[in-house]
Amino acid sequence: MNKLFGFFAMGVMVLTSCSGAQNAEQPWIVDRFDDIKVIRYEVPGFENLTLEEKELVYYLSEAAKCGRDILFDQNFKYNLAIRRTLETIYTQSDVREGDEFVAFEKYLKKVWFANGIHHHYSNDKFKAEFSEAWFREQLAKYINEENRQIEDDLLCKIIFDEKLYASRLNQKEGVDVITESAGNYYEGVNQEEVEAFYNGMAALDANNPEPVSYGLNSKLVKENGKIYEQVWKIGGMYSPALEKIVYWLEKAATVANPTQKEVIEALIKYYKSGSLKDFDDYSVLWVKDTDCNVDFVNGFIESYGDPLGRKASWESVVNFRDVEACKRTEIMAANAQWFEDNAPINPAYRKKEVKGVSAKVITVAMLGGDCYPATAIGINLPNADWIRKEHGSKSVTIDNITYAYDKAAQGNGFAEEFILREEDRERAKNFGKLGDDLHTDLHECLGHGSGQLAPGTKGDELRTYSSTLEEARADLFALYYLGDEKLVEIGLIPSLDVAWSQYSDYIMNGYMTQLSRIELGKDVEESHMRNRKLIAEWCYEKGKAENVIELVKKDGKTYIVVNDFVKLRKLFGELLCEVQRIKSEGDYEACKALVEGYAVKINPELHKEVIERNKALNIEPYGGFVNPEYELVTDAEGKVVDVKITYPANYIEQHLYYGKEYSFLPSLN
Ligand code: ZN
């Protein structure tokens, strides 16, 4: 493989300001607080785009920033009121030191990072480390009739009463996941009512081969005994923000090529009508446009934030093709049918004809909504099963983001602490990044798109377990094929060492190291984490008799090592077969047993140990980003002649700026 990032050595680093958190050894990290590090990313190749492409990036980026408030409100109905109150105090206060202020600043940084008062990953409400008395003093000093968003007493109760709105997304077995979750997708309804409402809708559509994703773009409320949807559209809920988004999309359409213009106009039509049929029409056009250089995601897309997996959070990503790195995914896409035909699953559940696998490696130019500050490193869309089956899906790996992660992690001591054997450390050093990238490519490009449902299975049978199972399916597909000689044969990897490095890393992360992200005493809730734990623990248990994976104790520390990579690959295949069967047949009971049995409960001793060892390294378990900024350069007549990119490196300033310039919704919606 070519080294893809050679040109980075010459990359300009424009560090405009310094927040003090930056340090000379780690210029990629711009801020760190609590369990978070904020990283900067660069946009290599932007200068080489045509003027029209640069303009397109600019307009789509503006649109990407305009939906930020929507996500805050979706995450919790009082988030915007809280953010605005905190920002008022923060910007007006003349005090800039003292324990209370420092704790307050940290809290605000966390709220910005999570787009609300609940942790972006664990979904738990943040604990304020400043006192209520101090906070009330600030309220009295800086909050008056004019800038008060909600009553002081209610505000204090929300922030300081730990039991109130404790979780944004509570999926614990046996609870009413709707009434126990603080997310703002439902109001006044319980789980039973929600399920009845949408089952009724789906039943009307039972024989439609192109069913829309009911509930995707609305809040479900019960008022005066009546249950109805408040649709997110122009003229409906979130209209002021959506109007701005559409304004910039209209600008984007003026510089887009004819195909992409059609795509953008279809999206505008959907934002205006709120019709999910229009959304599907748009998604079909979008997925078919595989030639575009600049591309984007903008809309209500992923449903991880809804305990029932129906309502989608608003997000946006603007990107363009990384031509050199795309050679990798083009090879994968060209062999898609071979992968499908050889998948270790029941032949009945293989796709007979793999359609429209489009995979590319991209450079991100702007992150917005649910992709900012924390973002995925791979995306596969659209989500509608029938569109994927009929028209395929687009899948991307985001290279400049993984590159920045990699840079920010250099020299942090993690490998020395957690990887026992020198040979594994060496393999990780040489092949780790490529293994990670290929895992993401395979997961997104082929994994999610593979397989098919049995006749009669609708796809919503797995309910709260569906995200975990789907992620497990994509991961297992990637892991299984990563260790296949075919990859060497088609030139994707130089040797299977790439796979073995990924296997060791995956098992260690799933079984142990990812636990550092979870508070002691808590269960695993997030679906990607659940999926990794499920795979690692299942394989550990099933391979125990043959010592495939081994837990080693040394000097009081626990290590996990893979002793037999080939046998581990076989186990990945066996689990993939079962996971695909569960999805294809909609086998809820088997799915529940698998997830509850392997993915949720944590061994408390191991958990404690991992947290302590990680803490000693001073590594924040979560990362997110600051965006670059773009500026139109015009000539004397006002004609756009260029677009300039700069890299601000101050987390606080970026969020205050967004809060001032890109905030369009009222505090309560
Ligand atoms: Zn995935």
Image (cartoon, rainbow, N blue to C red):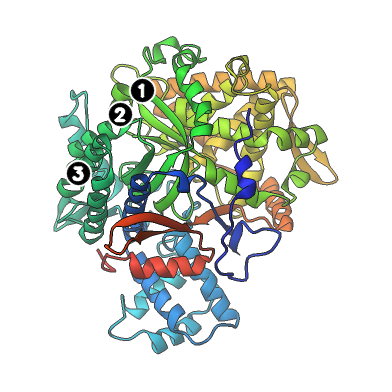
Percent x, y for residue 364? 46, 46
Mark seen at residue 270 = 3
Among all residues in the image, which is located at the extreme right? Answer: 555
Amino acid found under the numbered disc labelled 1: Gly
Residue type at tag 3: Tyr
| Ligand 1 is within 8 Å of the C-beta of the residue at disc 1 | no
Dot 3 or dot 2: first in sequence order is 3
Q: Residues within 10 Å of mark 2 (few under 14, many from 20)?
A: some
Q: Is the C-beta separation of discs 1 and 2 under 8 Å?
A: yes
Q: Is mark 3 within 8 Å of ligand 1?
A: no
The quarter in which the C terminus is drawn is bottom left
Q: Earlier in the sequence, mark 3 or mark 1?
A: 3
Sooner in the amino-acid sequence: mark 1 or mark 2: 2
**Marks 3 and 1 close (CB-CB < 8 Å):** no
- Residue 582 placement, left or right of 31: left
**Which three-letter amino acid code belongs to the residue tagged 2?**
Lys
Q: Secondary structure at mark 2?
A: helix
Residue that label 2 marks: 288
As measured in the structure, the alpha-carbon distance from the residue carrying label 3 to the one carrying label 2 is 18 Å
Percent from the top left, x then y, of residue 640? 32, 56
User: Circle 1 sits on which residue?
Assistant: 356
* Disc 3: CA contacts within 10 A as few (<14), some (14-19) or many (>=20): many
> Where residue 500 sits in the image (x, y, percent)?
69, 27
Q: Nearer the viewer, residue 117 or 331?
A: 331
Q: Quadrant of the N terminus?
A: top right
Residue at image location 56% in from the left, 53% down from the top: 623
